[in-house]
Image (spheres, rainbow, N blue to C red):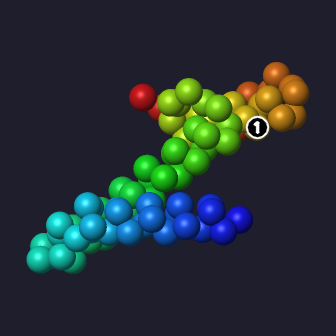
Amino acid sequence: MLGAALVIGALGASIEVSVLGRIYRAPELFHLLATFALVLIFRDAALSLYLGTGGQSSARAHCISRVRCNGSATRCPLTISH
């Protein structure tokens, strides 16, 4: 448990220095966009890690996991238009 906390702390520090540290002089909008982008990246990475989606989009991963968990052939309630 302590090891996981240290790894997450080191990851946060490296992101602070490498990504967020570079945009401190930029307007606030860049801070918001960078933070939101990082949230999306980590969310998709966590979904890929836990659901084993192999790089599919997070919405599709959620849809696939829901159909597999229920074991039914029902249509996914989440539709993505291209």
Q: Give, as a three-letter code, the residue at label 1.
A: Arg
Name the quadrant containing residue 19. bottom left
Name the quadrant containing residue 79. top right
Q: Look at 61% across and 40% down and name the residue there.
A: 49
Q: Look at 74% across and 28% down and name the residue there.
A: 75
x, y (%) of residue 39?
45, 59
Q: Which residue is mark 1?
A: 66
Q: Is residue 59 above or below residue 19?
A: above
x, y (%) of residue 55?
50, 30
Going by the image, does 15 lie left or right of 10? left
Going by the image, does 52 lie left or right of 42? right
Q: Look at 49% across and 69% down and name the residue there.
A: 9
x, y (%) of residue 80?
52, 34
Q: Is residue 40 above or below residue 56?
A: below
Name the quadrant containing residue 12. bottom left
Q: State the quadrant of the N terminus.
A: bottom right
Report crowding for label 1: few under 14, some 14 to 19, many 20 or more residues within 10 A (C-alpha). Answer: some
Q: Is residue 54 above or below residue 37?
A: above
Q: Would residue 33 be visible to someone looking at this image?
A: no
Between 71 and 47, the residue placed more toward the observer is 47
